Image (cartoon, coloured by chain):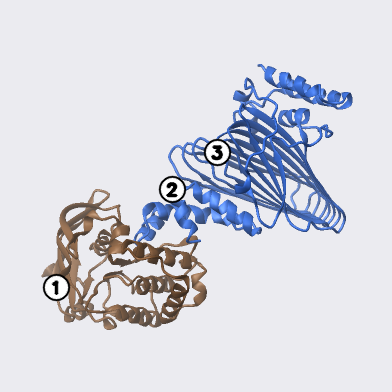
Amino acid sequence: MNMLEIRNLHARVEGKDILKGIDLTIRAGEVHAIMGPNGSGKSTLSNVLAGREDYEITEGRVTFEGKDLLALPPETRACEGVFLSFQYPVEIPGVSNMVFLKAAINARRKHQGLPEIEAVDFLAWVKDRVKKMHMDIKVLQRGVNEGFSGGEKKRNEILQMLLLEPRLMILDETDSGLDIDALKIVAEGINTMRSPERATLLVTHYQRLLDYVKPDFVHVLAGGRIVKSGGPELAQELEARGYGWLDAA
Amino acid sequence: MSLRHYTDAFQQLAVQLPSEERTAREASLQRFTQAGFPTRKLEDWRYTDLSALTDQSYALPSPATPDLSHLHLEAATAQIFVNGGDGAFTDTGREGGAVVALNAAFARNGLDLDIGPGQSLAQPLHVLTWTGHRTSAMTHLRHRIRLGANARATVIFHHAGEGAYLTTQVTDIDLGPGAQLTLYRVQDESAGSTHLAQSDVRLARDSVLDAISIDLGDGLARHDLNVHLDAPGAQAGLYGLYAPSGRAHVDNHTRIHHRAPHCGSREFFRGVVAGSARAVFNGKVVVHEQAVKTDSETRVANLLLSKTAEVYAKPELEIYNDDVKCAHGATFGQIDEDAVYYLRARGLEADVARALLTQAFAQQVIDRITHAPLRALVTRRFLERLPQGAMLETLL
């Protein structure tokens, strides 16, 4: 079954049309990369899928595992297994990472009809994943993303992803602002999550991340539409030639 | 203007008093009736309207035995004043404005704490005042705290009640050299209440005051906190959280007088204003001419949770010498909707996300409460007032 089906999706923000007819199908187990120049609508697509309310959907539909995704509020989408790794994770002073993670995990468990997670199990599990992301255990006591560097924020996103175990992972420019070591750690985190039951949508400007997380399909987004689709070799072509040749094509 | 009900009530009280006390109290009553309740024409009362009190009829209180077990505080010694308590009427008051004069005319003795030099209070004192009456009644209490040199104490004033009433609380505090007082004030009065309080604190050399004020009440509340840094090295920290909702009105006026060199004051207030509530904060720091090397900072931040909530917050500085370090600032804002989206994108319901962010904002003041049972009580009462707040209790 198709995990995600996007059909003729149009979206606008502040009266400006951004997405102008996106069609995309993602099946379980696949990794899709969406590439494109700045302003092509990459982040809009990510946020429309996650449920940000600033966008107006003017046409089209999106189904996730057979459900009408656009009808669901963001929290229900998250509980159903849609995860967006933010391009700019928000700093939340005063809310500790620990409280935040526990709240997020228990929200999902509640949605699934499961009891709240046992404190001891939770702690052990979180500590294990923190180690996997090469993060300091002390971050758990700090405010969510509070005073984090760009790289720390991105790692924190992947940490949340490891803990929430989503079905669809949308990674919005997760590679931007990362040095090569952090990029490898983040890529390893993403690869850990790859499985036949899960799908991944990598939204990126550069080919760099794709060296570490091999996509099955690459799509080029320009002017609010997917203008070209292909295999991993398309990413290399884009890296070599830039985005300009697509306009001419 | 008619204050007839107050003079009538006084006549009832006066017959019970020995003549000497009666005379002193008559003088206070006269000062009160001449001045009347402050009007909004006065700069200090611009946003707090007491005019409705003038024609109100409040009876003298009668004894009651309510069940106050839900207000019990662990790890503290309770001293409870129900309907004004049964203290004597020996304290005949002092100079002050109309509210102090009203209090001086009617007040029973409340807390009278005297800690000798070098002594410490074994555990915090929980001073609970509770007012509740079949008819509208008024209670007036006069509290005193004196700490000798290097003495230490923690005092928790906790004000609650039921129904409609007027209560005034006047507190005088003297800190000897090197003394340290942690003073909590939790105002949790009922929706029909009017709570008028004034506290004056005098600090001797190297003494330290930490005053943490929490306003959670649903009525009209006003607290004037006057701090006098009278000798070198004295330090005052004033912290506050006001969280009115519904139709509540809360007004905090603080005055810090720097009268000696090398004193410090920190003031940090946060407001969470919901519903059609109104909050007023006025924090004035006066640095007198001789108070060189003063180090002072005042910060107030406000979170408005509804379009009909109002807040008037003003930090003020008056400086009469130029060898000082003084800063102040005020901010006003709403919940960060980007943060709400972020939390929702991780599965938290919108109301829960907003409650969590609101609680985090308030926590910066609540964390100042080092007495764990009190911190738990304040956190619980604060969360109870937020939609979905109760859900957070299990999380924190």
Q: Where does the image place residue B330, in percent across and percent down from the top left? A: 57, 47
Q: Is residue A172 above or below residue B362?
A: below
Q: Where does the image place residue B45, in percent across and percent down from the top left? A: 63, 31
Horizontal side of B280 relative to B9 (left or right) equals: left
Q: Would you name the residue on which mark 3 appears?
A: B218
Chain drawn brown, letter?
A
Three-letter code for the amino acid on which mark 3 is drawn: Asp
Pick the residue in front: B79 or A82. Answer: B79
Q: Where does the image place residue B241, in percent across and percent down from the top left? A: 59, 48
Instruction: Look at the image and give the colour of chain B.
Output: blue
| Crowd tier of the residue under label 3, counting other residues whose Cα lies within 10 Å: few below 14, some 14–19, many 20 or above | many
Three-letter code for the amino acid on which mark 1 is drawn: Ser
Disc number placed over residue A229 in the picture, else none = 1
Residue A89 seen anywhere in this rendered image of the structure: no
**Picture residue at 70% right of the left edge, 30% below the top:** B62
Disc number placed over residue A54 in the picture, else none = none
Disc number placed over residue B387 in the picture, else none = 2
**Picture residue at 37% right of the left edge, 60% below the top:** B342
First in sequence: mark 2 vs mark 3: 3
